[in-house]
Image: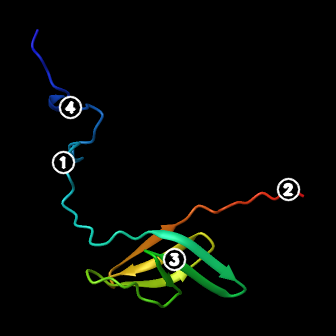
Amino acid sequence: MPLVSANSLTDPTRPANSQTPGIESSIDYKTTYKLSQIHIRNRHKAAIVNGQKVVAGDWLDDTTESAEVLDITANSVRLLIDNSHIKVLTIAPLIKEYNR
């Protein structure tokens, strides 16, 4: 009985133009953006992205690409990356239960 490795088998349900598992994409992501907090008080909205406190109109400090904060909502932050595309960062809402 011949030996067959899992890497030599193809998935018949995989689309023809999809990448082979284990081969990295050629897209070069310059910066990873991490949204850790959103603060909303009255009409003031702020967020913590990559450890930096930002409000709408601010620019994130990064030397590899420019990112402007477009908008902050209760659960997301929209960024304009290199004046070409928009990235939306989301955060799961924190729900606290209080015993009365």
- Is the C-beta separation of discs 2 and 4 under 8 Å? no
Residue 68 against residue 30 in the figure, above or below = below
Q: Which mark is residue 52?
A: none
Residue 6 in the image: above or below residue 49: above
- Residue tagged by mark 1? 23
Q: Residue shown at 14%/30% (left/top)? A: 8
Q: Which residue is mark 2?
A: 99
For the N terminus, the quadrant is top left
Cα separation, mark 3 vs mark 4, equals 43 Å
Residue drawn at x 22%, y 47% as measured from the top left: 19
Q: CA distance from mark 1 to mark 4?
A: 14 Å
The amino acid on which the numbered mark 4 sits, given as a three-letter code, is: Thr
Q: Residue at x 40, y 84 (%)?
A: 60
- Looking at the rendered structure, the kind of residue marked 1 is Ile
Q: Mark 2 against mark 4, which lies toward the viewer? A: 2
Measure the alpha-carbon separation of dots 2 and 4.
Answer: 55 Å
The answer to whether residue 45 is left or right of residue 10 is right
